Amino acid sequence: MKIKTILRILVILVILLLIPFLVFQFMPQASMKGKEASFTVDTHILYEAFSTDESKANETYLGKVVETSGFIVEQLLDESGRSVLILSNESNGVGQVYATLEEGKKKPGHDYSPGKKISVKGLCTGYLMEVVLNKASVISSD
């Protein structure tokens, strides 16, 4: 009788621990769609802010929705298969912003080849050797 009681308690505990895990695992990610940009800046201004005073730029931009525009230097795929647009206002690619696009946020029929001017909006997650925008979406492209 005691073994059955212990097994029942263990099964109930496993179920209680499994439910929150599954809820968080399959919860949809927050989207930037419909969110207003807190700041609208060119890529070189955004990059300069981080490269000159990273702590002040973190206070200003980190965790906020930023809209930026510049020229596409390169398009890559990250380890999850999402498109990453590398933007810069300089022809030599100095002062870059990496914008990782949300799935399905590339505008169909638009050309994302190097040299094209584009505007993106995304969540600023900081500065490594370039400014990083995640959950980005394309606002406009020429």
Image (tube, rainbow, N blue to C red):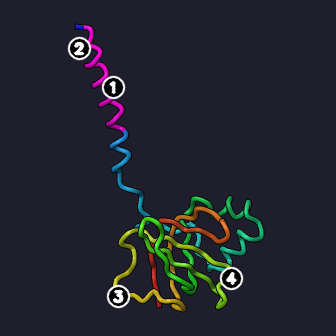
SS at mark 4?
A: loop
Q: What residue is shown with label 4?
A: 94
Image x and y of residue 32, in percent:
44, 65
Asked whether the beta carbons under mark 1 and mark 3 sit within 8 Å of each other, the answer is no
Image quarter where the N terminus lies is: top left
Does 71 appear above or below 65?
A: below
Single out the residue that lies furthest toward the front: 3
Asked whether the beta carbons under mark 1 and mark 4 sit within 8 Å of each other, the answer is no
Alpha-carbon span between mark 1 and mark 4 = 55 Å
Looking at the image, which residue is at 46% across and 66% down?
79
Alpha-carbon span between mark 3 and mark 2 = 63 Å
What crowding class fits label 1: few (fewer than 14 Cα within 10 Å), some (14-19), or many (20 or more)?
Answer: few
- Name the front one of labels 1 and 3: 1
SS at mark 1?
A: helix
Q: In the figure, residue 92 lies in which quadrant? A: bottom right
Alpha-carbon span between mark 1 and mark 3 = 51 Å
Image x and y of residue 135, in percent:
47, 66
Alpha-carbon span between mark 3 and mark 4 = 28 Å
Q: Which residues are magenta?
A: 2-20
Nearer the observer, 27 or 46: 27
What crowding class fits label 4: few (fewer than 14 Cα within 10 Å), some (14-19), or many (20 or more)?
Answer: some
Three-letter code for the amino acid on which mark 1 is drawn: Leu
Q: Report the disc number at residue 13.
A: 1
Looking at the image, which residue is at 45% across and 86% down?
112
Asked whether the beta carbons under mark 3 and mark 4 sit within 8 Å of each other, the answer is no
Mark 2 or mark 3, which is nearer the start of the sequence?
2
